């Protein structure tokens, strides 16, 4: 059985999907891009600013499921430009304690709303 999880502190889904779905003891969080949940607009700034906004959105959804970044077991990072990897990786490391979750990082030809970064994750509850 699956149950939708959502937070008003994260952007609303911009398509026919849930912010997150709980299935048993797992939480699957949809990819988050750097949208401001209050305005629905892309945040201003460079990839660092966009990365911090993505993590704020992810945190809000995790908290709606009574979870935190400590519960995350897998992430996928999508970058518009792999040249941003070093900056994103440095910021990414500040959000997770050891052991860090498993991760894949890929460059995508284009991300929704022309974001520079998108991250999805799986958490164990």
Image (spheres, rainbow, N blue to C red):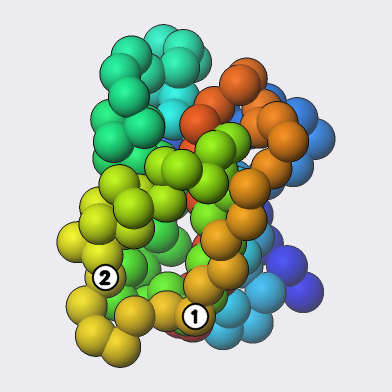
Q: Which residue is mark 2?
A: 96
Residue furthest out toward the bottom = 99
Q: Residue at x 54, y 38 (%)?
A: 81
Q: Which residue is mark 1?
A: 102
x and y percent of residue 1 in the render? 77, 74
Q: Is residue 41 above or below residue 55?
A: above
Element marked by disc 1: strand
Please say whether residue 29 is visible from this viewpoint.
no
Looking at the rendered image, the quarter that the C terminus falls into is bottom left
x and y percent of residue 119 in the render? 52, 51
Q: Residue at x 45, y 25 (%)?
A: 35
Q: Residue at x 28, y 30 (%)?
A: 49
- Front one among 113 and 90: 90
Quarter of image, res 114 = top right
Q: CA distance from mark 1 to mark 2?
A: 11 Å
Element marked by disc 2: loop
x and y percent of residue 116 in the render? 51, 31
Specify few, some or many for label 1: CA neighbours under 10 Å numbering under 14, 14-19, or 20 or more: few
Q: Is residue 113 above or below residue 98?
A: above
Specify few, some or many for label 2: CA neighbours under 10 Å numbering under 14, 14-19, or 20 or more: some
Q: Is residue 102 above or below residue 13?
A: below
x and y percent of residue 88 in the render? 35, 49
Could you say which disc has been placed on residue 124 in the image?
Answer: none
- N-terminal of the pair, mark 1 or mark 2, is 2
């Amino acid at each position: 059985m699956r149950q939708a999880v959502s937070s008003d502190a994260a952007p609303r889904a911009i398509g026919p999907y849930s912010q997150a779905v709980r299935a048993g003891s797992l939480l699957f969080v949809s990819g988050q891009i750097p949208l401001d949940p209050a305005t629905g607009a892309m945040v201003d700034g460079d990839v660092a600013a966009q990365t911090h906004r993505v993590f704020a959105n992810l945190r809000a959804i995790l908290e709606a499921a009574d979870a935190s970044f400590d519960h995350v077991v897998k992430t996928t990072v999508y970058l518009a430009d792999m040249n941003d990897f070093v900056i994103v990786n440095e910021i990414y490391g500040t959000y997770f304690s050891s052991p860090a979750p498993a991760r894949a990082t890929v460059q995508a030809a284009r991300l929704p709303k022309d974001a520079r970064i998108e991250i999805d994750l799986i958490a164990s509850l």
